[in-house]
């Protein structure tokens, strides 16, 4: 298991009404010989650690954040999930991953 450098948590309400805890953990980007890697796991959606590759550590970290945003966006727009904090809608999750609140993509 990776040692995260950043973690965030919130809830997702599924169309069935089920409330699911989402925990996102981002690992420290690592520079290797000719590329960099950055791991991310999104518990509550995808339990696997996903490695994102970039030319350097900034790009690898950026791609890890983009991966998280894309998966959360799919959960909302395709699967019909609603992100929440303490039972209230949480459209600001997009801002955490480089988007703007209320605007997919």
Image: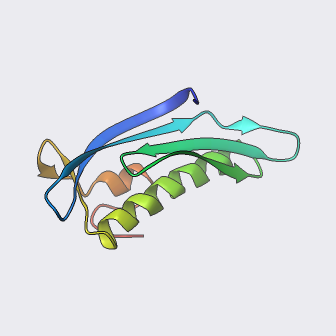
Quadrant housing residue 57: top right
Q: Residue at x 39, y 52 (%)?
A: 45
Identify the image quadrant of the C terminus. bottom left
- Residue 15 lies, in percent from the top left, at 18, 65
Residue 86 horizontal side relative to residue 24, left or right: left
What kind of colouring is applied to the model shown? rainbow
Taking depth in this image into account, of 103 and 9 the one nearest to the observer is: 9
Q: Residue furthest right?
A: 33
Residue 31, placed above or below residue 45: above
- Residue 99 lies, in percent from the top left, at 41, 61
- Residue 55 lies, in percent from the top left, at 77, 52
Q: Residue furthest top?
A: 3
Identify the image quadrant of the N terminus. top right
- Residue 33 lies, in percent from the top left, at 88, 40
Q: Residue at x 72, y 52 (%)?
A: 54
Quadrant housing residue 72: bottom left
Residue 54 horizontal side relative to residue 38, left or right: right
Residue 41 horizontal side relative to residue 30, left or right: left
Taking depth in this image into account, of 78 and 98 the one nearest to the observer is: 78
Quadrant housing residue 63: bottom right
Q: How many marks?
A: 0
């Amino acid at each position: 298991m990776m040692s995260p450098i950043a973690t965030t948590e919130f809830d997702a309400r599924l169309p069935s009404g089920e409330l699911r805890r989402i925990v996102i953990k981002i690992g420290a980007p690592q520079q290797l010989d000719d590329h960099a890697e950055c791991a991310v796991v999104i518990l509550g959606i995808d339990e696997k650690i996903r490695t994102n590759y970039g030319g350097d550590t900034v790009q690898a970290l950026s791609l890890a954040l983009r991966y998280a945003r894309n998966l959360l966006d799919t959960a909302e727009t395709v699967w019909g999930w609603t992100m929440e904090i303490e039972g209230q809608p949480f459209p600001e999750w997009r801002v955490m991953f480089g988007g703007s609140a209320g605007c997919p993509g």
